[in-house]
Structures are given as structure tokens and as C-alpha cells.
Image (cartoon, rainbow, N blue to C red):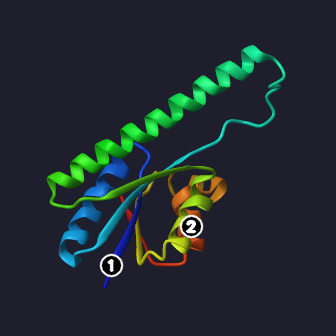
Amino acid sequence: MYSKILVPVDGSQRAALAAAHAAQLARHFRSQVVAFYVVQPLPGYVNTNDPRIEEVLQQISARLEKNAIEVLEQVKQEMLKNGVEPATKFVWGHPADEICREAHEGRYDLIVMGSRGLGEIRGFLMGSVSNRVVRHAPCPVLIVR
């Protein structure tokens, strides 16, 4: 039923729960799993003409990438404990857009992701990554709370 599962992660407890749930599904359905991390770009309004600012921005970008790799490795190790060997991938961009793009281009059968738990009213007013993914994904989305 689900041969390819996308698991967006961000280092949060909810994402870890979603990854554990995805591992159970993958084991049951013998699915391929990809743990996916989206690094949000730094604001574009910063004046990068100053070489000191440019250096700091490069350091921050490098740290954000390192964090993404660390989170993905942690998720991979947890899934391996559950008998599932996921692929890992990270990209730069807006999380909801990139998750939907990856799901479409990778032809995934299911997205399993955590909910931030913003609450009904706050989530409606602010929107959330999970809400946007549910509305725009090309495949079913399972939200783990």
C-alpha cells in the first residue's frame, strides 16, 4: 500500500514520534523511507556588502547545515533500532513548499509528520507547516500528535 514514505523532521519531539510511527509503517509495508529536513534560508534583507556580515552569515549557514545533518543522523539511528534503514536528505527552502515538492517529485505514497500543536485558533490564524502540507501535498498525509 505504501511503498515510499517521506518523513519530514526538524529535531522536535513530535517529529521524533512521527519518525517512530513511520518506521512501524515501513516495517509493516516493507516501505522505502526518506527522512527529510528543510533548512530555512536566512532573511534576504541583510546588507551583505559588509565582509564581516557575510562571514557571519556563512558561519550561521554552515551551522544550520550541520544541525540538519545531526538531526537526520539521529533519526536514522533511531529508525535503524526499529529495523528500518532510511535514506536521508536535506534542502534549503520554505518547509511546507519543499516537503510538497519532494513528495511530488519523489512520487511518495505517504507523508508522515509531526504536528507542532499550535492549537486550533492559533494554527488557523498563523498557519502551520503541517496544515499547509495537508492542503497541498500530492499524497496522503499522516499527522502524528
- Mark yes or no: residue 61 visible: yes
Residue topped by disc 2: 100
Q: Which mark is residue 45?
A: none
Please identify the residue farthest to the top as the structure is shown. 52
48 versus 11 height, above or below? above
Horizontally, residue 68 falls left or right of residue 47, namely: left
Q: Are marks 2 and 1 in contact (CB under 8 Å)?
A: no
Q: Quadrant of the C terminus?
A: bottom left
Horizontally, residue 88 falls left or right of residue 51, namely: left
Mark 2 is on which residue type?
Answer: Cys
Residue shown at 48% from the left, 78% from the top: 139
Lower position in the chain sequence, tag 2 or tag 1: 1
Horizontally, residue 62 falls left or right of residue 142, namely: right
Looking at the picture, how far across and down is residue 71, in whole percent?
Answer: 37, 41
38 versus 21 height, above or below? above
Q: Residues within 10 Å of mark 1 (few under 14, many from 20)?
A: some
- Mark yes or no: residue 117 visible: no
Residue shown at 73% from the left, 19% from the top: 53
Looking at the picture, how far across and down is residue 12, in whole percent?
Answer: 39, 43
Residue topped by disc 1: 3
Residue shown at 36% from the left, 50% from the top: 14
Mark 1 is on which residue type?
Answer: Ser
Residue shown at 28% from the left, 73% from the top: 31
53 versus 11 height, above or below? above
Asked whether 23 or 54 is in front, the reply is 54
Q: Quadrant of residue 27?
A: bottom left
Q: In 3D space, how far apart are the residues under numbered discs 2 and 1 (Cα atoms)?
A: 17 Å
Q: Secondary structure at mark 1?
A: loop
Looking at the picture, how far across and down is residue 75, in whole percent?
Answer: 30, 48
Q: Secondary structure at mark 2?
A: helix
Foreground disc of the pair 2, 1? 1
Asked whether 65 or 129 is in front, the reply is 65
